[in-house]
Amino acid sequence: MNKTRFAIGTSTVMAASFFLSGCQLLSGYQKIDEAENAQAWAGDILPVAGEVNIACVGTYHCEIVQIDKKSIIASNSHEPADPTMLAARPEGAETNTKRAIGAEMPALADKKSVKVVPLSASAIEGLTNYYARVLPAKREIHINFYPEDNLGYIERFAMIHDFTDAGIYQLRAYQNKSSDKAGSLLEAASPEPLCIELLQDDEVQRRFCKQLGSGEAQGEFVETGLGNKGTA
């Protein structure tokens, strides 16, 4: 199977957590099971003609922290890094059609412009999920995923993608569940890897899975073939 070491992911856990066992440190993978309906929590993306809309889903909370060189959602405040990037949802967005409401939103000025729009209340109390609006271009995207109801545990993901076509793109996290896991109790207790799919208008375009074993790519997200769902 062809693999591409393209995206890098790191886990961040608060210092006190390092005294826990390895299985406890990775308990977030088990928590993803409880967040499988995360997409149901998401509100509507309001597409604007000619623009790329980028959202993340699949865990308790996630944030687009950087696009190219620009900070988007600040990791400390969990709010837009620059308040001028915030684009309010137009009144009537919950009752009118998405296309009609999207047409009311101000267009982006140029390819360097980024706007963030509130999408829904987060599954972590007090936070908001946002999606980003940009113009089509090759982009470097950085996202923080929170698999647990705990802001101290972060899975960091980065990728470069050529967003050639306007539309709705989602970076969706899920836990790869192997149907043929067997062997010792230790193997059975090991966490399944976290995988992230890039969807364009609900069609999977790319897939990355975190490497949990030993080796040069351990702890990194490695791109896998679409014919091997979650197999890294």
Image (tube, rainbow, N blue to C red):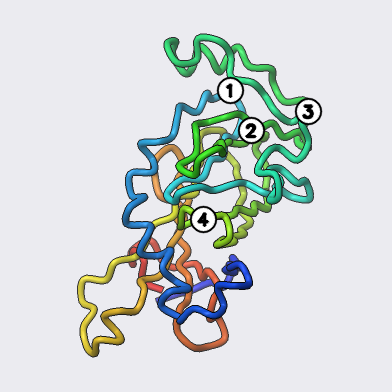
Mark 2 sits on what residue? 133
The image shows residue 72 at horizontal and vertical percentages of 71, 42
- Say which mark, if any, is on residue 147: none
Mark 4 sits on what residue? 150
Q: Quadrant of residue 43?
A: top left
Contact? badges 3 and 2 (CB < 8 Å):
no
- Give the Cα distance between marks 2 and 4: 27 Å
Residue at x-position 54% and y-position 80%: 19
Contact? badges 1 and 4 (CB < 8 Å):
no
Q: Quadrant of residue 97?
A: top left
The image shows residue 220 at horizontal and vertical percentages of 55, 73
Contact? badges 3 and 1 (CB < 8 Å):
no
Residue at x-position 41% and y-position 74%: 232
- Give the Cα distance between marks 3 and 2: 13 Å
Q: Quadrant of residue 8?
A: bottom right
Q: Which element carries disc 2, helix, strand or loop?
A: strand
Q: Label 2 is placed on what type of residue? A: Arg
Mark 3 sits on what residue? 84
Indicate which disc, 1 or 4, sits on the residue closer to the N terminus: 1
- Give the Cα distance between marks 4 and 3: 28 Å
- Mark in front: 3 vs 1: 3
Q: Which element carries disc 1, helix, strand or loop?
A: loop
Q: Label 1 is placed on what type of residue? A: Val
Q: Which element carries disc 3, helix, strand or loop?
A: helix
Mark 1 sits on what residue? 48
Contact? badges 1 and 2 (CB < 8 Å):
yes
